[in-house]
Amino acid sequence: MTEPLFAGLKVIDCASYVAAPAAATVLADFGAEVIKIEPPGEGDAWRTQYKRPGMPRSEHNHPWLMDNRNKKGLALDLKSNSGKAVLDRLVSQADVFITNVPLPGRERLGIRYADFAETCPRLIYASLTAYGEVGEEAGKTGFDATAYWARSGLMDEVRPDHRAIPARSVPAMGDRPTAMALYGAIVTALYQREKTGRGGEVRASLMGNGMWANAYLIQAELCGVPFPPRPPREESITALTNIYRTLDDRWFMLAAINERQWPALANAIGIPSLTTDPRFMDVGARRVHAVVLTQILDAVFARKMLADWRVLLDEAGVTFGVVGTAAEIATDAQALVAGFLRPLADTGMMTVDSPFTLGNADKVPVEVAPRYGEHSRAVLRGAGYTDSEIADLQASGAIAGA
């Protein structure tokens, strides 16, 4: 393996939960040295996610393994003077500093961009907030469920129909797309630094990324084109982009939006006469009679198993997507062969890969996420501290861990 793309790049992950740390994870995937800083006690609250009420019992800390792989763990008390001095030294040696500490907390801890800009002019300071950096809600806390999904309108828009209750997101469902935005901002700033020699501050927010994800409908509103409330699937205005249930109670999404797929679909379901039926001969007619066509397709698809329909629709070249389950994706043959799942060190388990590759830059092998404070002493030695100084810091409680 050639030298990793980001070999020599030093990153401080001074963040919690998912969105900001996951951006650091992607940098680590390509070889950056990432130091994960956690507060005294139990560390990052994301460590205990798998133990919370409603979570299945597991010996594996699956959220932590996913979002903090390939990092070095440093337990550091930023509220102490000596702990803050350690951070200042680490930042002075770093290329990137990532944080999602709420803005008021950054001011109290002295970890704002302004606190580093003068002494670290090449530093890329990556800031993640819930609702942005300015305005009345700038200091407000939020999670992806509240700021990305709920506030952006996505939670309202993805409900089955306008009469259903808002749809709930699963943990971190908006965090990881937001992480990719923050990663993109960091890499853009690194490119800018190559041109100018100077670092700077980059910003991303959960709300802003949720709005970006919901931009189709938000832009329509901005253009004065409000969409009507979503009808039940049985009353959809198009039958060829709808979800259908099979004999074994599985669902798939039909997306036959290309006109030439209509006769292919009709042949695949064994009713070629649909293409000559005046109600369905063209797009306009099928839209007028969408409810009837949906009823026909409902009855047809309910006669065979999902596995049978997958073969028939694939052979016909009809676009569709199975409504998969996490259990299926974990052993999905396409996900494995395409590299979307990668081996997790020597654990015998797999992990989800970051969502892009470079043709001439390999990712580093995946190492397990650090135990609490696992590399505290090693990180400080690398920063130039003597064993005696490290012992003093540990005795004072400024650092913790092995």
Image: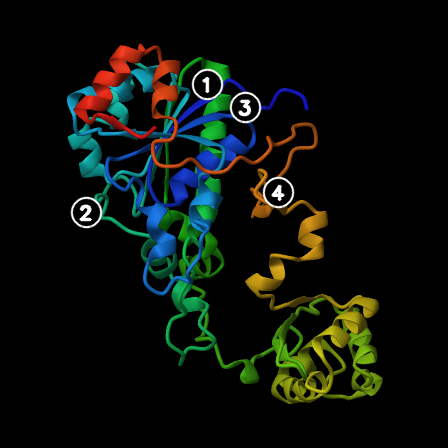
Q: CA distance from mark 2 to mark 3?
A: 38 Å
Q: Earlier in the sequence, mark 4 or mark 1?
A: 1
Q: Position of residue 86 (x, y in %)?
A: 26, 19
Q: CA distance from mark 2 to mark 1?
A: 32 Å
Task: Decide which of 244, 347 is in the foreground and name it.
Answer: 347
Tell me whether the residue at label 1 lies in contact with that at label 3, contact meaning CB atoms closer than 8 angstroms: no
Q: Residue at x 50, y 81 (%)?
A: 232
Whole-number angstrom distance, CA of label 1 to CA of label 3? 15 Å
Closer to the chain start, of discs 2 and 1, is 2
Give percent across and percent down for residue 87: 28, 22
Check disc 1 and report the residue beneath it.
Answer: 193
The numbered mark, 1 or 3, whose residue comes first in the sequence reads 3
Q: Circle 4 is placed at which residue position? A: 343
Amino acid carrying label 3: it is Phe
Residue 153 sits in quarter = bottom left
Q: Secondary structure at mark 4?
A: strand
Which residue does the numbered mark 3 point to in the structure image? Answer: 6
CA gap, disc 4 and disc 3: 21 Å
| For the residues bearing labels 4 and 2, Cβ distance under 8 angstroms | no
Distance of label 4 from label 2 (alpha carbons): 45 Å
Q: Which residue is mark 2?
A: 136
- Kindly tell me whether residue 121 is visible in this rendering: no
**Is 46 situated left or right of 159 in this image?**
left
Q: Nearer the viewer, mark 2 or mark 3?
A: 3
